Amino acid sequence: MIEEENENLTPEQDETIPAAPTEGAATEDSEEETDAQLTFEDFKLNKQLLNAISELGYEKPTPVQQQTIPLALAGHDVMGIAQTGTGKTAAYVLPLLMKVKYAQGKHPRALILAPTRELVLQIEENIQKFSAYLDLRTVGIYGGVGPKSQIERIQAGIDILVATPGRLMDIYRKGEVILKELKTLVLDEADKMMDMGFMPQIRQILEIIPRKRQNLLFSATMHERVHILSEEFLEFPMVVEVTPQATPVETVSQVLYQVPNLRTKIALLEYLFKDKETFNRVMIFTRSKTNADNVSSFLDRKGEGGVRVVHGNKGQNTRINAVEAFRDGEVRYLVATDVAARGIDITDVSHVINFDVPIIYEDYVHRIGRTGRAEKTGAAITFANEAELYHIHRIEKLIKMQIPQELLPEEVQVYNTPFDEQQEIARELDNQKRRENPEFKGAFHEKKAHPKRENIGKGAKVRDAKKAGWKKTKSGGASKSKRGKR
């Protein structure tokens, strides 16, 4: 399934890949100059929201906010295609808070669906910040913890519900949440929900909520399944696309190192992190939980600034505490699998390290979007072995730019690749060639099946030998018995 999704590239993406854009590249000047003059006051938001926005330090709306907020306030269904880190959460939260305004009744009037518990927590936190001067009740529900405390919060009364689709359906089936008063539905990170297999739950939710409502859908990419979903529940949507689909944020510089093996990747990490002033708050992404734990253990042994690790085997409280410690600056490194690629909004991440190249190519954009947020600059560094370069080429087609490559610094020791790792890389290269050419056999093609032999007992073997005319000799061997003796 993953390969089918990644093959879903447009014809334009197969053309020559342009070089990375230089800083300060020209844009649509006339439109940008007009939008740059907009302020939050121009949206006619109420005083309570404006006070909260001012206290949070937001001076002017981002492009996605400039286009989305007026449409949402006017009651339109909106489909937004926007990169992570562009301020899209505020783009739908602010008009939503204008619509809900104050606490009323016991049942939710707005529902926000998100793919991961980290993103649910992030959205809930943002809503609480923006609604600091409003009398509103927001509850976030997600899996990984017992539902009892979440149900108690819902029963106490709720205005805005933020949920993962699976946990929402679990609590709904228990009869503990009533959705008949919903007026607004928001789907955030719709493409990620499709990747995680939430389509059945989303369709179930669409069946049980009121048909008359406002719908907002946001996605970083617009692959076919998101388009199908949008047709199912959006009515004459206004489309907001502030950047080309799956394009990295311009404030993030990108660098690629070709690194032969795992041990050399660790050595490169060690070399880079000697510069503590530059690499002051770093997120490191791995493809597997094992690599995440290995990198975390290495950094922990070095004892340079502290490290936390986040992946699927970690408990919910452990994951939350790890992210909070990183956000508060208590630790220098956060190591994570792609479970944390979305939903972590930390504005001062100096670098993102792709220790492993993601095989779901859109995740590359979401990973590096953890830095360069809120119009600040950031850097993304990717390590790729020989087999991972195949995925790098596909990522470059997706983002429509070439990732600049640099040579390994001379100070980095290059280790020999262990036999098992050599075999794994060779096997992956074979698989890649086989995907391109189904007739390719390679070094790891399946062996021919040997004919099955019947396992018969010793007595049967002796009887069969006698029937064939064989007899045992003094030497212990067997010879053909003489027949027709005179």
Image (spheres, rainbow, N blue to C red):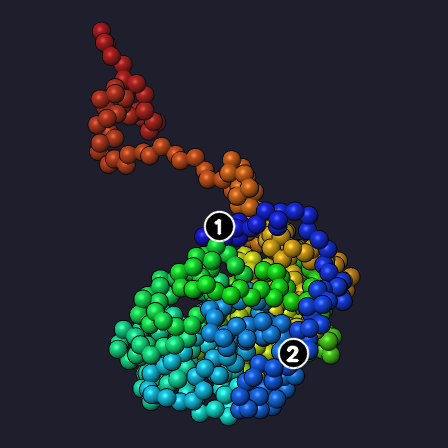
Residue at x-position 32% and y-position 34% = 453
Tell me what residue is drawn at x 49 percent, y 68 percent: 78
Distance of label 2 from label 1 (alpha carbons): 42 Å
**Any part of residue 51 in sight:** yes
User: Sequence-wise, which precedes: disc 2 or disc 1?
Assistant: 1
Q: Secondary structure at mark 1?
A: helix
Whole-percent x, y for residue 348 in the image:
65, 79
- The tally of labels here is 2
In this orientation, which residue lies closer to the viewer: 228 or 472? 228
In the displayed image of the protein, which residue is found farthest to the right?
Answer: 410
Do the numbered discs 2 and 1 sit on residues whose CB atoms are within 8 Å?
A: no
Residue that carries the numbered disc 2 in the rendered image: 38
Q: Which mark is residue 249?
A: none
Q: Which residue is mark 1?
A: 4
Q: Secondary structure at mark 2?
A: loop
Is residue 322 rendered to the left or right of residue 378? left
The x, y position of residue 391, in whole percent, is 59, 53
* Vertical arrangement, residue 461 with respect to residue 430, above or below: above
The answer to which image quadrant residue 86 occupies is bottom right
Q: Quadrant of residue 350?
A: bottom right
Q: Residue at x 55, y 41 (%)?
A: 436
Q: Residues within 10 Å of mark 2 (few under 14, many from 20)?
A: some
Residue type at the position of mark 1: Glu
Q: Is residue 109 left or right of residue 383?
A: left
Snapshot quadrant of residue 274 = bottom right
Quarter occupied by the C terminus: top left
Q: Residue at x 69, y 73 (%)?
A: 34
In the displayed structure, would residue 56 be above or below residue 2? Answer: below
Q: Amino acid at mark 2?
A: Leu
Q: Position of residue 165 (x, y in %)?
A: 38, 70
